[in-house]
Amino acid sequence: MIKTILDDYLAIEYNKEALHPLQSWEWGEARKKMGIEVLRISANKNVFQLTFHKIPKINYKIGYLPRSVIPTKDVLDFLTVYAKKNKVIFIKIEPNVLKSAIRNPQFLNPLIVKSKHPLFSSWTQILDLNKSEDELLKNMHSKTRYNIRLSEKKGVIVKEMSNDRGFEIFSKLYFETCKRQKYFGHTPEYHKIVWDSLKKNIAHILIAFYKDVPLAVYELFYFKNTFYYPYGGTSLEYRNLMASNLLMWEAIKLGKKLGAEKFDMWGSLAPNYDPNNSWSGFTRFKEGYGTKFTEFIGSFDLVINKNAYNFYNLIYQLREKYLKIRSLLLR
């Protein structure tokens, strides 16, 4: 039986069934504060939290279901009916399911197609936090270990500042990094709402300092038995001190302290990646910590309005080309 979850539902009960921070009650509340429509349903002891995003200037929406279990046929049928009633062109579905966990990562629904424009990378890197600190250090690349020790020796100090002052430092370095790397990220208002909504139970902020100067910062999520690294920023000052290497090591230790069994690095290229790819730098950085490349089943679209869906994909492709050209011109 499929049931719509109302706002008076207990968050603590809901989160017992949620798989991922983006399925948490707190994340849904954050999205609602941004003016985004949120739908929560339960089915067979699983919960599904979707967001619906209005397309500017036209009376249509796009749905998004991130990091849930694979929805059953009954759930997909329910969502199809809901989407038709609410002028939804398609619903993007990106399950929190590893490709290695199932034989055939396909949906039993003729309206499901492989997405041409995933939001999540199908690959990530995961670190086993059940290992001791000595084992974790031993499994790192030698250069990563060297940089950690160098940073410690030079006097870099890492502090957890999971408070509003810490968020201010995070926001400053994060957006400096976005500007420097020509990355079009979310707005400061978006990040402030996310922080305010998740800071009590999920979000943590770690900052690496040298002589009271913040050099690198991470916003990290802890949910269930997993620690996540979704956001980070760095300063151009004292780059030779390798603060980011020490910061990641302290993040790993914080994850262990909180009780996490694994550390999900929130995205990566696939193994044997192209060194010229724009993601190669942070993929190599994460790889240095002895992580395991891990593949999810990928991104799928539940297509409700085929003609509008095809037109949307065309506009999306044109927009991507424009942003790429704009990025090149800004260099």
Image (cartoon, rainbow, N blue to C red):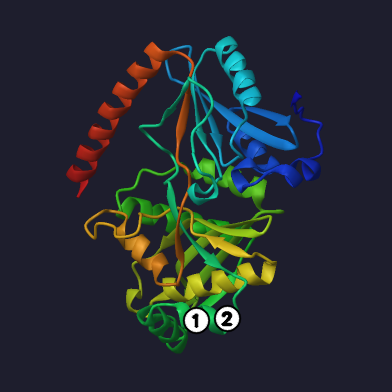
The residue lying toward the viewer, choosing from 240 and 312, is 312
Q: Nearer the viewer, residue 305 or 54?
A: 305
Q: 245 or 262, which lies in front?
A: 262
Placement of 118 over or under 156, stated as above or below? above
Separation of residues labelled 2 and 1 (CA atoms): 6 Å
Residue 35: tell me if it is visible.
no
Where disc 1 sits, the SS reads: helix
Q: Where is residue 305 in the image (x, y as percent from the top left)?
A: 45, 13
| Looking at the image, residue 325 lies above or below residue 75 | below
Name the residue that disc number 2 marks. 133
Q: Are marks 2 and 1 in contact (CB under 8 Å)?
A: yes
- Give the farthest residue toward the front: 103
Mark 2 residue type: Glu
Q: What element carries label 2?
A: helix
Q: Mark 1 points at which residue?
A: 137
**Picture coordinates of residue 83, whole percent (x, y):** 57, 16
Residue 228 x/y as whole percent: 56, 57
Q: As rendered, which of 306 and 38 lies closer to the eye? A: 306
Name the residue rendered at 45%, 43% in the picture: 120
Amino acid type at mark 1: Leu
**Residue 257 in view of the camera:** yes
Left or right: 82, with 303 as reference point: right
Q: Residue 110 carries which label?
A: none
Examine the rendered structure and indicate whether residue 150 appears above or below residue 2.
below
